[in-house]
Each structure stands twice: as C-alpha cells, then as structure tokens.
C-alpha cells in the first residue's frame, strides 16, 4: 500500500530556509498529486499548496506565495517543500498528503508522519 | 477564499452518546466536503469525503450529511477511541484551493 515517509525534525534560525522531503512508496510520484499541510503547536490544519493534475501546475495558498516552493524528483519518488524567510510563526509540524481513493483529489486519505520545524534564534 | 466555520468548538459527551458536529461554509462547496479525525501526536485520518462517503476502513457509526453550505458529521454511539479533534475541509472548483475548519474537540464528559 502507499506510504509517505518524511524527513526528520529541523531547527532553523529566523530568516533561514528549510526543505522537507516526502518519499513515496507503493506508488510512483507521477501517479499522485502531492499536497502540503502544516499545523502550528496547539492550532488547526493549514493547507499550503499542492499539485493540480488538471493543468499540471502547482498551486500555492496565497498566504505562502513567494515564500514556498514545492518540487518533485520523479527518479526517486520524492516530493519536497521548501519554505524561505522563516519566522517564529512558521514553527509547526509539516505534513505531505495525497488522495488515492478519492477522485479529483477532493480529500487526502494518505498522510506522511509529519516533520517538526522549529524556528528559533 | 471559502471559510469553514465549525461548531461547537468543544463538545463534551460520554461513551455511548450520539455526537453531532457542524461545519458551515461561507459559500456553497456543493458536496465537496471532507471530515478528518486527529489524535494527539498523529496525522489526521480521513473519515468522510464528498459529504457522505465513508473512507476505507471507517466504522459505520461515522456518517456525514449536507450539501451547499451546511454539513454535519454524526457519530451514532461514541466509543472511547472517538475522543479526538475533528476537522472539516473543502476544495473549491477553480482555482483548486483547499481550506480547513478550525476544528471541534470532542472530549469525554
């Protein structure tokens, strides 16, 4: 079955960048539309962006445009999310997520285990 | 951007009772609404998609209903493992943007 395995926890200083990886197994990355969702400590879920297969583009939530880049390496079936100009408010668990059994990627039934990113001076 | 508002923020019930959670959208999302359960330290788990379809492996005590702007997640008889935080989520048609509600915490009374 499909599994998403994310990279380990990161500690970054304000102003730095972080790059989180999400390795796919059980499927190839080209068969999936990968999305990224984050959750600040004690807070709710926040969608950051993801791949839209209808036009082949990655769409970002307006809040993160200009600061986030989502890429894929199909040779290793690994997706990446890079967030730049980090600030303390970016401290959160970052999840990759995708939809397998839900047509049109209307919901996410497969999630990575999460990657804790801490931004602190 | 479509805003999802969940109510109540916290729901206190006992095992065996019926739970009713609400999610209201700021504009119509047709039937493109999903529900997730999240326990501490875990990733969210998909329960319901397209408003009323149970995801694979989800027990029949979980059901979803609604369309347009008003949606409900019902847990018919609470089990101890059902106490968690529940989120609704929608995907707009174009551009395909996703938003989550702020969550409802279901706690043991």
Image (spheres, coloured by chain):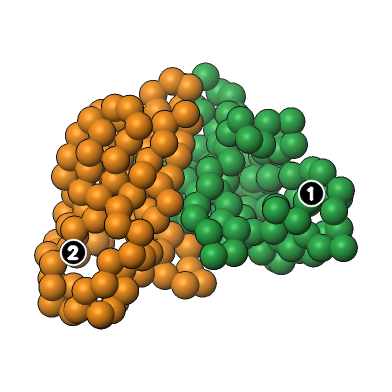
Chain colours: A green, B orange
Residue A51 appears in view: yes
B69 versus B108 height, above or below? above
Determine the chain carrying the residue at label 1: A
The circle drawn on residue B19 is 2
Q: In which quarter of the image is the C terminus of chain B?
A: bottom left
Task: Look at 44% across and 20% down and name the residue there.
Answer: B94
Determine the chain carrying the residue at label 2: B
Query: Camera-side residue: B37 or A120?
Result: A120
Q: Mark 1 points at which residue?
A: A86
Task: Look at 59% across and 64% down and name the residue there.
Answer: A41
Could you confirm whether marks 1 and 2 are on the same chain? no
Numbered disc total: 2
Horizontal side of residue A24 vs B47, given as left or right: right
Residue A113 appears in view: no
Horizontal side of residue B53 vs B46, given as left or right: left
Query: Camera-side residue: B30 or B60?
Result: B30
- Quarter location, residue B75: bottom left
Percent of width and height locating residue B97 = 48, 31
Task: Look at 25% across and 62% down and name the residue there.
Answer: B57
B77 versus A117 height, above or below? below
Horizontal side of residue B75 vs B49, given as left or right: left
């Amino acid at each position: 079955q499909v599994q998403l395995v994310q990279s380990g926890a990161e500690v970054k200083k304000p102003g730095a960048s972080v790059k989180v990886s999400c390795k796919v197994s059980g499927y190839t990355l080209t068969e999936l539309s990968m999305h990224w969702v984050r959750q600040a400590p004690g807070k709710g879920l926040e969608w950051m962006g993801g791949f839209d297969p209808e036009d082949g583009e990655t769409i970002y939530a307006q809040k993160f445009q200009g600061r986030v880049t989502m890429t894929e390496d199909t040779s290793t079936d690994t997706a990446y999310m890079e967030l730049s100009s980090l600030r303390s408010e970016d401290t959160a668990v970052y999840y990759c997520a995708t939809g397998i059994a839900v047509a049109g990627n209307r919901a996410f039934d497969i999630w990575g285990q999460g990657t804790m990113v801490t931004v602190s001076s | 951007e479509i805003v999802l508002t969940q109510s109540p923020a916290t729901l206190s019930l006992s095992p065996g009772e019926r739970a009713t959670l609400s999610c209201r959208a700021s504009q119509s999302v047709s039937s493109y609404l999903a529900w997730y359960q999240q326990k501490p330290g875990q990733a969210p788990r998909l329960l319901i998609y397209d408003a009323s379809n149970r995801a694979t492996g989800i027990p029949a005590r979980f059901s979803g209903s609604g369309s347009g702007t008003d949606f409900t997640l019902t847990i018919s008889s609470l089990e101890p493992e059902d106490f968690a935080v529940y989120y609704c989520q929608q995907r707009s048609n174009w551009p395909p943007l996703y938003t989550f509600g702020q969550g409802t915490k279901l706690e043991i009374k």
